[in-house]
Amino acid sequence: MLYAARAPKPSAELDFSLLWLAMGLLAIGLVMVYSASIAIAEAARYTHHNGEYYLLRQGIFIAMGVGVGMAAFRVPMRVWQQAAPYLFLAGLLLLVVVLIPHIGREVNGSRRWIPLGFANLQPSELMKFLAVLYAADYTTRKAAFMHDFKKGFLPMAAVMMLAGALLLREPDFGAFVVIVSIAMGILFLGGLNWKVFAGLVVVLLIGFVLLILTSPYRLQRVLGFMDPFADPYGKGYQLSHALIAFGRGEWLGLGLGGSIEKLFYLPEAHTDFLMAVIAEEFGFVGVVVVVALFAWLIVKAFLIGHRAAQLERNFCALVAQGIGIWIGVQALINMGVNVGLLPTKGLTLPFLSFGGSGIIANCLAVAILLRIDWEHRQMMRGKTF
Amino acid sequence: MNYHSRKLLKLNLAPWRMATVGGLLLAGLTVVAGRAFYLQGLNTDYLQGKGDAVSNRNLTLPAHRGQVTDRYGQLLAISTPVESLWARAADLNLSADQRVHLARVLDISPAELAKTLTRKTRGEFSVRRPVTPEQAVKIAAMGLPGLTLQREYRRYYPAGAVTAQVVGFTNVDDKGQEGVERAYQDWLAGRAGERQILRDRHGNTIRDLAPIKTAQMGGNLTLSLDLKIQYLAHRELAAAIEKHKAKGGSIVVLDAKTGEILALVNQPVFNPNNRQNYKPDLMRNRAVIDTFEPGSTVKPFVAAAVLERGLFHPDSVIETPDNFRVGNKLVHDEHHHPELTVTEIIQKSSNVGAAKMAMTLTPQQHWEVLHRAGFGQLPGSGFPGETAGRLRDPATWKPVEQATMAYGYGLSVSLLQLTRAYMAFANDGEVMPLSFLKREPQEIVGERVFSPTVAREVRAMMETVTQEGGTGTLTRVPGYRVAGKTGTAHKLVNGHYAPDRYLASFVGMAPASNPRLIIGVTIDEPSDGVYYGGSVAGPVFAQVMAASLRLLGLPPDAPETETKMTENAVSARGGA
């Protein structure tokens, strides 16, 4: 009895480092969203000049995300796999719904949101999570054809192109890139013939060279982001101010709340360009901390996936690593845009940027990672799933 | 069926693939960190410079504009703080009620207000500069979002129209546009200071960075004007313009000893404190900027020219028939005098006599005297836009032109220029440089134009103008001897001399024994039937001269009898 009392409780078998990692990212995000948004919120009419407007909402989103994550954690991975195709279908349906006029809400020329009264649902954020589930399930099911371009790659490509086309209709180019990355990454991990990928890379390279040869101006437009100070009041406006924020931050930053660029110079400071505000207020040290947290999260996801593979739980392995790819690619693109390495494409920073759907989807992802890890721990004790 | 049992379909999840994907992601993050290292560690100066260029602003600290006073310290122009209403486009958010209320306070229609408030869609712009203190209080009480009251300095001219054309005025940005305000802009304006601030994108100050320069107060300016003389000149001129139904006129009062301009007035005139419906025509300082053909007022210079060359004495007798032919032109005198002395030619203003005297000179000699007197050259008062008049090259003069030039046609002058030239007669041959600023007597160096003898001789001739038999008997001043010359010139209209349009003028000095004041008067197109310089400009001269002499407290130099005659003259004028 004494021994039994000292045995760890099931709840203690969670990967707490992963949980705290996610919580840490959410907390940093909450603080930085507040810092980045105070001035904007106080100046805006729709917030009734309430400086805590975004803080309050981001707090509610995080609470909702934690709630959704706790619920998702209770669902066995087996159920997730069985539901994956249907969930993906439902996701596609939402992508269609958002495009219907009068239902989808248009902001700044993009139709990305479905108003739900208290908040807006952004199907593309959810779709990233569903794409992970679906691609993992597909790859597991089609394991036998992974060497085959026609039977292995093309059906998946067709489905992803359908989702991609819907996303580009909104348009949401960022989500398109993330979802394509997830699908390709999972296919690659699932053992799809590497020659297919080699071929894809060659095709992309040829296309790129053709682009340069046929219309240099188009290339100019694609690469225009490289020098934002060439047109600092037009196309380069946003990026030039993001870079200025980095430059002002130096090593240790101007201190929390000290950002100047967030004072209306930098648009989307609390969403797409939150990283620039972090860089300005906490300097290179702050940037490295955030980058390291994301690296750690990715490593965690891949290690959990690796463990699942060892346990021959292929779906779980692909889901875990798919989540790693998702979070990794999205963070990479967002930060790449912030530091001027990639063209501005409207993608938020996972866990940190303001936005309800994104936060909830990210929490779902972490909950699934925790669930997979938890199931492993249970299997170690002889339980099967 | 448990999905783990599907052995055949089992995937082979190769560790190298996981390592590749994971490694790529981590490599990407490393590149991002490396880029951040470059931006935040190595390229900071460049980026911060770009940022500062956008967010740092040098604010100007307005310098208080110096005041302008007359020679005794009477205020002519002062800067007073006022409030101006400015709008910031991004924050403009007025309710319908507020709009109606604001329109009422500003005394404009709501439509006009709406138009003003949508003048610009970004940045800051002025709504009303300035608002009255009452309006400012009401607007401040309303607390309108996006509208702010800003302190500015507005110029106020206590003497109003009386000094308007001399002092000039500033524009809405407090920059001198006309007159002394323009001529001495740099001195009056001082130097605005600067401080550097950090601003957000909406223009709000986040914090002060550094004061760069402190503001330097504008300097004060003491003009040579005597406001009392200026005022009475203004009054007399206005009265004469009305009496003679004239188009306009000017008076210049000079201190003969110093060249200082004691008064300078024109008609028509404007109110510099209310320029809402101004006409540029009213703002013109005619005495300095406009030219006219001087007519008989140049005859003393011809007399001086022949005297100084010893060609004639004041008492030399010259035959003066009614008509005198030069080339194909007949020079004509209106009054019949078979022969006149040189003095009488001046006294009675004989065109024939003046022409005959002039014809004894070569064109070069004739020109040289006029040139020495300052005709055809800038008078040097420093007033913006002052004119040099016109004096043609003597090589191009035909005899007939030289003849007409003797009695004031074919050349043009400004009143200021003409009055200045008379300084040579008043000041024993020396002309003092003109000045609109008060000067200390010791800093003045004159320019010799005539010998003292010639100057006194001509002055004596001009004194006879005001005596019985002269053309200027209405210019006499009780208690003082007056010397001067009348002028009645036909005006040039479209290249022809109009038979019925005249410019009546008189330039004179007193006390004639040792002149202290020179006063030039022009009346443009008197149209009540009287048009002789002596009868139109002369009485104005007399009034201004009499009052000015009294104001300056100059001792009378005329014998008692002279005074009586003047009284007769005044009553005669009243009866006419």
Image (cartoon, coloured by chain):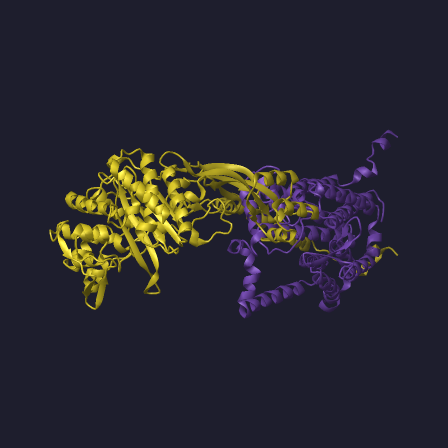
Chain colours: A purple, B yellow
Left or right for A18, reference B325:
right
Quarter assignment of residue A111? bottom right
Please name whichever residue, B2 or A341, is drawn nearer the observer in this view of the structure. A341
Farthest-out residue, top: A2
Left or right for A210, reference A26:
left
Residue B554 shows in the view: yes
Rendered view: B401 above or below B386: below
Please name whichever residue, A341 or B488, is drawn nearer the observer in this view of the structure. B488
Q: Where is residue B446 shown, x and y percent of the image?
A: 22, 42
Q: Where is residue A310 shown, x and y percent of the image?
A: 75, 50
Left or right for B394, reference B276:
left
Residue drawn at 71 percent across, 67 percent down: A149
Residue drawn at 56 percent across, 45 percent down: A246
Q: Where is residue B526 shown, x and y percent of the image?
A: 37, 55
Residue B257 shows in the view: no
Left or right for B82, reference A360:
left
Q: Where is residue B222 shown, x and y percent of the image?
A: 36, 37
Residue drawn at 48 percent across, 44 percent down: B273
The image quadrant where one finds the N terminus of chain B is: bottom right
Please name whichever residue, B353 or A82, is drawn nearer the observer in this view of the structure. B353
Please name whichever residue, A296 or A122, is drawn nearer the observer in this view of the structure. A122
